[in-house]
Image (spheres, helix red, strand yellow):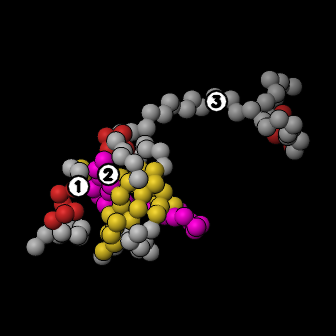
Amino acid sequence: MTSDPEPTNDASRQARQPRQSVFLNATLERFGGGAATKHRVRDLSVGGMRIDQAVGLQAGATVVVTVGNLQAVGATVAWVRDGWAGLKFAVPIDPDQARSKAAVAPKVADPIPKPASGIVPTAGWIRDLNSPYRGKP
């Protein structure tokens, strides 16, 4: 007996792509409204993925999923069992791209905060805060 909650019929095993064991976050949006839900991705392949925290998902439902660095992709819920779900992507994805880290340029902080346009401090010492003559007689 295995701990794999996926269906075990031979036809589905032959058609599956090689899976990578991963620990990624995914966001699922259901058609017809409702709030997006967060899930953990446990297995990922070119054609689908296995997620946990699948409460409320139903087999056959169509969803839009965003995982890692991938753009949102359509998927169909193939099966749901014991809090797990298998999703089949509408189009093949690149698992390595999903696992890669986002290339984000570091944000350089402004050393001198600037007041928002049109707002001038008027209370007590605050109005003189940026004055070069503050504190001089």
Q: What residue is disc 1 on? A: 16
Residue found at x 23% / y 70%? 7
Tell me where residue 38 appears, x and y as whole percent. Answer: 45, 61
Q: Position of residue 20 (x, y in %)?
A: 24, 50
Residue type, numbered disc 3? Asp
Give the residue at mark 2.
Answer: 47
Amino acid type indicated by mark 2: Gly
Q: Between 10 and 93, which is closer to the camera in this rendering?
A: 10
Q: Quadrant of residue 40?
A: bottom left
**Residue pushed farthest front?**
11
Q: Indicate which label's residue lies in the foreground, 2 or 3.
A: 2
**Depth check, front residue: 118 or 15:** 15
Gap in angstroms between the C-alphas marked 1 and 3: 51 Å
Q: Which residues are magenta?
A: 30-52
Tag 3 residue:
110
Q: Residue at x 79, y 37 (%)?
A: 116
Side (left or right) of 132 relative to 30: right
Q: Amino acid at mark 1?
A: Arg
Q: Which mark is residue 64?
A: none
Residue 128: image x %, image y %?
84, 33
